[in-house]
Every structure is written in C-alpha cells, then in structure tokens.
Image: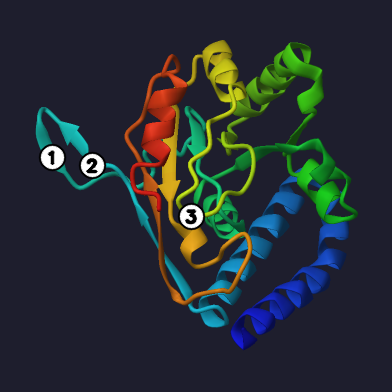
Amino acid sequence: MLKTILFYLCLTIWFILWTPLLIIGLISKKLEHFLVVTDAWGVIAIARFIGGIKYEIHYPPVEENGIPFIHNINTRLDGRAIIASKHMSIMEVAILVTHVPHAFFIIKRELLWIPIYGWAFWRMGLLGVNRKRGATNMKILSNNVMKRVMDGMTLIIFPEGTRVQPNHKPPLKRGLLFIAEQLKLPILPVGLDTGLYWPKKGKIKSGTTHIFFERELSSSASLEEIHSAINKHSC
C-alpha cells in the first residue's frame, strides 16, 4: 500500500509540475503534441522506477511469399489504419501515444473540459464525442477523423468505451465500425494486460505488462472479430 501511495503522489506532482508547460504549448499544435508525449514518457518512467512496472510490446509476424521474417515494428502505425485497443489503465495510453507517431484519440467530450490538461488534449488534436447525439454526431466525428488522418495522424480508439478490470470483457461500442466503414480504413486490434499491474482500482503491482498488436482486420470486420482479437492475450 505504501508503494501505491508513493506512486500516485509522484504521479500527481509530475502532472502539477507539467501544467505550466502545457499552457505554453497552447500556442502551437506541434509544440503541444511534443509536450504531451514527453509528459507521457514521464508517466512511463514513474511507473517503471516507482511502481516497478516495465513493459514489452509485441507485434504480429509479417510474411512475404509465405516465408516468415522479422517484423517491421512500424507496421500500420502510419495513420493508414485505426488502432482499436483494450483499455485498462493510463499505462497503455502513455505507451501508445509515445510509440505511435502522430497519434490522436477519440475521448469523452467531458475530458476536454478539464482545465489545462483538457485544453492541451484539444490543442494536440484529440476528438471529444458526445454520445447522446447519436448518428448525427458520428457523421461529424467521421469527417473530423478523416481530416486528421489525411494530415498524417493515426487514430487510436478504445472501443470498450471505458477502463475495465482484468477478466472483464464488455461488448464493444458500434462507433468503431461506423468510422472504419465510412473511411474504409482497416482495423489494428491491440490487446494488453496492464490492469494486472496498474488496475482501475486497487494496489500498484510490480511486473512486466504486455501490449499485443494483433493481425490487421478489414474495415468490414464484425464487432465479434474485433472483440476476440483485443481479448486474445488480455487477462
């Protein structure tokens, strides 16, 4: 319990110390993106040195002419696919935003209202969604996603809609399918087990968490296929 208290105390101090820089970053989208990514590297460092949480990223093998070879770690991290990830903690958010170039997320609109950090998220290109507006909102959202993808950014979405506990595999939101179909973008599923070490509620535990980039799915994939892929290696 002492380690958990110390961990969250260090994390809180880090976020507070970073706020003046995020305010300065509001002058430029590029600068704000750099500052948020650097902030995320700090979160990873605190998780490693205070929480004892390391991480490993696993990419799917790639085959050429039927002969397996060492995979290209940049496979489909180039904006030409939607990354659909399981969501258990802040840990995978930090890992994904630091390892996927020019990433942006679709998040709850209310998160953009958080002073300073919410403004920074908006400035770097994150999209807020109002779930109550239904189909009309999804069309606007798809157009905004397309503009960012055309500008070289990569969409990361958490189709479960919220953080989940280990062994919890809720049904996925249909918004992912709408965006993928509208934009004709393939889907790159991501499974993980971060909740075992940095749970939504409870103690921080030392260990090595794993992030699994699964094989790419087509834009017409079903929710069942995506659900199965992101939960393939998840606890």
Residue at 61% in and 83% down: 1
For image coordinates 62% across by 58% down, the residue present is: 90
Q: Label 2 amino acid?
A: Pro
Residue ID for mark 3: 166
Look at mark 1 in the image and give the residue it sits on: 68
The correct choice, above or below, for 10 with respect to 145 in the image is below
- Dot 1 or dot 3: first in sequence order is 1
Residue 181 vertical position relative to residue 157 in the rendered view, above or below: above
In space, the residues marked 2 and 3 are separated at their CA atoms by 26 Å
Residue type beneath disc 1: Pro
Q: CA distance from mark 1 to mark 3?
A: 33 Å
Identify residue for label 2. Answer: 61
Tag 2 secondary structure = loop
Residue at x-position 51% and y-position 46%:
100
Residue 194 x/y as whole percent:
49, 59
With respect to residue 53, does 223 lie above or below? Answer: above
Q: Amino acid at mark 3?
A: Pro
Q: On the picture, is 12 further left or further right than 228?
A: right
- Here the colouring is rainbow
Which one is earlier in the sequence, the residue at label 2 or at label 3? Answer: 2
